[in-house]
Amino acid sequence: ASLRDSPKLIWFTDLGSGMLPHLDGLDYVITDHHTPAGHDDSWRHFNPYRYDVSGEQAVSGAGLAFLVALAMNPENRDLADLAMVGAAGDVQDAAACRFTGWNSDIADIGEHAGVVHRYSDLRAFGRQTRPLYKLLQYADDPMLPGLTGRAKACRTFLQHLDVPVKNGRRWKKWVELQPDEKRHIISSLVGLLLSKGFGHHRAKRLVGDVCELPREEEGTQLRDTREYATLLNATARYGHADVGLQVCHGDRDDGLTAAYDLLKDHRRCIAQGIRFVKKEGLQEYGGLQYFNGGSVIRDTVVGIIAGMLLHSNDIKNSGPLVGFAEKNGSEIKASARVVSSLTDRGIDLAAAMQHAAQQLGGIGGGHPVAAGAVIPRGKEKSFLALLDREVQAQLA
């Protein structure tokens, strides 16, 4: 109601395309990369799907906002670093292990502006900040057999290599290694994967595009786009988007300190949520698997937890994984994730979640591989039945 009472133009960024039927009467513009629900082919709706470009892999909401800013003023090319943070945060390099489409073009603009450095390296998260053994311990794309999730095994593996992995008693970080030392570790990891029968396709996923931001200090959370994105996630998902905005505006004092504090809380929240689901166990409904986080898991992170669980060793069923969490007293947030091999077979979670939610008076949308919905409280089982029907129809 407050939006409809506003006399001002409303700019929806990274959302809006899935709400087109609900925007009648509003003076708006949209820059959104999610699958559109309905049609708006006017200038005010900037969405890659209108140009037959994938919003799942080719450009993020941040990238679209950057392209608008660039059109307004070419001097804004120095904002390309934040656009690549958005692309990394949406894991848009995951399918090809590199940035493609409009993201690749934006990275080129950033490199010419001196604010982005894109090169090929180990893709594991934490290259700037994690000790080497933790880098391997938390590696999940690909999983490292015998190493992922096992700190002691990772330390032993690294210490048996002919690479100085410590400075005195302190473990080095990946960015502190020399190129030949990196190559030796990567070769050893490739050998490990092949020896365990994982094949060249899995081994090739070890290496791919990484983007560093030269204006940021090396060895910090802000130097790497993926780590920067995680820091921003930790602000907005807990009601402190203003802190993330301060960091994006260059605040490296109070704003950055507050962001780091929120990141610590974010990690605790994620760990608590994963422990809860593992303790309670996953349920099955038709071809779906699901968990209900109730009030224990925040609605703003239930999708992250679903995604992490889906790609862990704890999931046996390859079907879509749905997570529920209380949004407020009358609504439930549902987040769904699916492995890419099932989207290749025809599953489109964005469409399935949208159609299932609409039948219950809710809303939904997102991407084929990751989508969300808001439904009335108490309708979780009805939603699962509708969603399972949608998914089975897509696979038929």
Image: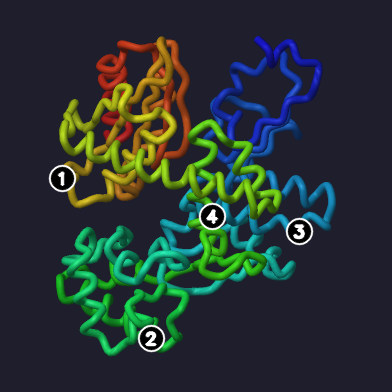
Pointer 1 residue: 316
Pointer 2 residue: 181
Pointer 4 residue: 228
Q: Few, some or many C-alpha atoms within 10 Å of disc 3 (few <14, some 14-19, many ≥20)?
A: many
Whole-number angstrom distance, CA of label 4 to CA of label 2: 25 Å
Helix, strand or loop status at disc 4? helix
The residue under the point 30% across, 62% down is 142
The residue under the point 44% across, 65% down is 129
Residue 150, position in %: x, y? 19, 62
Pointer 3 residue: 77
Q: Are marks 3 and 2 in contact (CB under 8 Å)?
A: no
The residue under the point 18% across, 33% down is 282
Residue type highlighted by circle 3: Arg
Whole-number angstrom distance, CA of label 1 to CA of label 2: 36 Å
Q: Are marks 4 and 1 in contact (CB under 8 Å)?
A: no
Residue type highlighted by circle 4: Tyr
Residue 112, position in %: x, y? 72, 70
Q: Few, some or many C-alpha atoms within 10 Å of disc 4 (few <14, some 14-19, many ≥20)?
A: many
Of circles 3 and 2, the one toward us is 2
Work out whether mark 1 precedes mark 2 in sequence or the reverse, and give the earlier one: 2
Could you say which quadrant of the image residue 303 lies in? Answer: top left
Given residues 308 and 365, the one toward you in this image is 308
Please give left or right for residue 168 compared with residue 68 in the image: left
